[in-house]
Structures are given as structure tokens and as C-alpha cells.
Image (cartoon, rainbow, N blue to C red):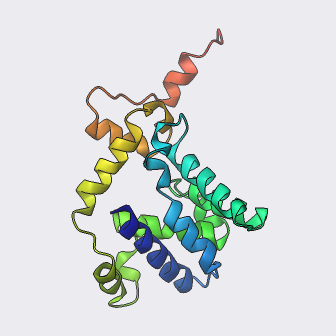
Amino acid sequence: MIFHHSRRVFLFGSLHARARNLRPDPELLYISAMFHDAGLLFPFSGTPQRFELDGADHARSFLLDRGFPASAADLVWRAIALHTTPGIPGRMEPEVAATNYGVLTDAVGWELNSLESGRAEEIVSAHPRGDFKKEFLAVFVDGLKDRPDTTYGTVNADVLEHFLPGFRRTSMVERILDSPWPR
């Protein structure tokens, strides 16, 4: 399921980039797409940081171990680390923007109707969605349930709040009011 999702992210991101006259490096975009959810999976799901950082760290190491320049590894790191962050990736490098656009399209249908006619059907035919909504959310819950504090301030808290009994997100207001400052 994650493989097909990641391939769709690459393909949807590529289409959105072309429509916006962005020119991402296709190899770096592909690596960003393929690693973007790696942090939800074992062995990364047990670390005490956001899953996006786990995937970004893994992709960065993967690239550096294979002789890619640090600048390319850092660019992929940003694309993965920011792929769930609303509003910011679209103002960054083409690889960062396109990764985010591909994720948004495959996960929530963002701009699906603006894609070239027939392209979405072609992509889904090659990389089927199956019961994506249910399976994808289950992967999120499995990848985050043992590290719920890492979801603070992210859309990931939405998933745990919906599926994990007893989970309650902490708000910024609570963090300020409960800080050690007297006033």
C-alpha cells in the first residue's frame, strides 16, 4: 500500500509541477516521494521524533551513503520533513513543493480535477488505491500510537484523536498556561 501510494505521490507531484512550470529534479523528487512515509514503518516508528523527520533522516543517509552531494540530500530531507506542513512547501524548491502537492492529491484529493484529463485514472490503474483510506489511516495509527507526543502541532494529531481511545491533543494555549513562567 505504501509503495503504490508513494509512486502515486511522485506521479501526481510531477503532474502538478509541470502544470505550474516547476522543474524538479526527477530523481530527487522520486526519492522524496518513495521515502516520505518511511518514518511510519518499522524500525522508524519507535523513535521519539515526528515520523516525517524519521523518513527525512533515513532518506538523507541513503543518499549520502550512495555518494549524492549533501545539497541533494538536504533538499530531499526538506521535502520529506515538510510534506505534511500546510502552506510552506509550495513556497520552497520545486522538489519540496511537488512532493507536498503529490501527497495532498493522493491523500485528500487536492486539485484532483485540475490534472490533465485521464491522467489520474492512468496513475491509479498502474498503482491501485485498493482500500487506501482505511489502510492508510491504519498505517498512521500504527506508526504514531507509541509516540503520541510527536504529533503536537501537526495534522497527525487528527489521526490519533479520531482512532486512539483516550488520546487528547495538547493545545498551544495549554502549553503557555502550564509553562513554568509565573505570568
Q: State which quadrant residue 133 falls in.
A: bottom left
Query: Relative to the observer, which residue lies in front, 157 or 142?
Result: 142
* Residue lying farthest to the top in this orientation: 182
Residue 167 image offset from top left, x and y in percent: 33, 29
Q: From the viewer's perspective, is residue 73 above or below residue 161?
A: below
Left or right of 101 in this view: 169: left
Query: Relative to the observer, which residue lies in front, 120 or 42?
Result: 42
Instruction: Say which quadrant the N terminus sits in.
Output: bottom left
Q: Residue at x 64, y 82 (%)?
A: 23
Instruction: Say which quadrant the C terminus sits in.
Output: top right
Residue 104 image offset from top left, x and y in percent: 43, 65
* Residue lying farthest to the front in this orientation: 66
Residue 59 image offset from top left, x and y in percent: 60, 58
How many marks the image carries: the answer is: 0
Left or right of 98 in this view: 155: left
Q: State which quadrant residue 8 falls in.
A: bottom left
Q: Residue at x 49, y 22 (%)?
A: 174
Q: State which quadrant residue 27 falls in.
A: bottom right
Left or right of 105 in this view: 36: right
* Residue lying farthest to the bottom in this orientation: 117
Residue 63 image offset from top left, x and y in percent: 67, 63
Q: Residue at x 47, y 29 (%)?
A: 171
Q: Residue at x 48, y 54 (%)?
A: 38
Q: From the viewer's perspective, is residue 94 above or below residue 70?
A: below
Query: Relative to the observer, which residue lies in front, 63 or 13?
Result: 63
